[in-house]
Image (cartoon, rainbow, N blue to C red):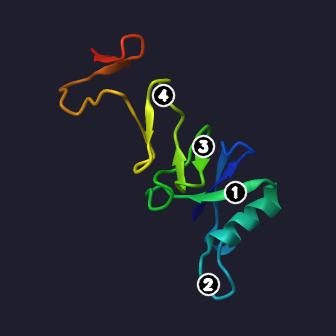
């Protein structure tokens, strides 16, 4: 099975569907994203991009509301806070202050721009 995400004109994911391997393979039995995306387009219209539960392509599995960044070839989740910055290497949002050395549960306080409990 393969998974494909439909993206709108702003590259925002509007739905994710499962497609049979039979509908993503060429006549030689080789799976291609192009064939799968074309199948989705012919069935439902719109633009389709393959996604993967394992994150082996496009950094992570696409979710509704995620944005597909063609330059990074990645699905990017919605920005959690206005101050957070996108890491172009990982396609993850990062707080302006790192929290790796904090133990336990912490939440980001956008007002004070700090981590708090």
**Secondary structure of the residue carrying numbered label 4:** loop
Q: Position of residue 86 (x, y in %)?
A: 45, 39
Return the residue nearer the eye: 87 or 4: 87
Residue pointed to by mark 4: 80
Q: Residues within 10 Å of mark 2 (few under 14, many from 20)?
A: few
**Left or right for 27, reference 95:** right
Q: Residues within 10 Å of mark 1 (few under 14, many from 20)?
A: many
Residue pointed to by mark 2: 29
Judged by depth in the image, the label closer to the viewer, 2 or 1, is 1
Q: Residue furthest top?
A: 111
Return the residue nearer the eye: 97 or 1: 97
Are circles 4 and 2 on residues that touch, CB within 8 Å? Answer: no
As drawn, the label of residue 67 is 3
The vertical placement of 9 against 111, above or below, is below
x 26%, y 23%: residue: 105
Can you say which quadrant of the picture contains the N terminus?
bottom right
Q: CA distance from mark 4 to mark 1?
A: 25 Å
Can you say which quadrant of the picture contains the C terminus?
top left
x 67%, y 81%: residue: 26
**Secondary structure of the residue carrying numbered label 2:** loop
Q: Position of residue 24 (x, y in %)?
A: 65, 72
**Secondary structure of the residue carrying numbered label 3:** strand
x 45%, y 46%: residue: 91
Are circles 2 and 1 on residues that touch, CB within 8 Å? Answer: no
Q: CA distance from mark 4 to mark 3?
A: 13 Å
Q: Position of residue 60 (x, y in %)?
A: 47, 51
**Secondary structure of the residue carrying numbered label 1:** strand
As drawn, the label of residue 48 is 1
């Amino acid at each position: 099975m393969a998974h494909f995400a439909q993206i709108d004109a702003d590259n925002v994911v509007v739905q994710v569907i499962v497609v049979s391997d039979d509908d993503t393979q060429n006549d030689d039995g080789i799976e291609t994203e192009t064939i799968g995306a074309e199948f989705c387009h012919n069935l439902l219209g719109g633009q389709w991009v393959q996604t993967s539960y394992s994150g082996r392509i496009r950094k992570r599995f696409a979710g509704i509301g995620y944005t597909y960044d063609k330059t990074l070839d990645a699905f990017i989740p919605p920005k959690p806070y206005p101050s957070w910055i996108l890491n172009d290497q990982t396609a993850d949002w990062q707080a302006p202050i790192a929290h790796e050395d904090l133990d336990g549960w912490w939440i980001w306080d956008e007002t004070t721009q700090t981590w708090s409990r």
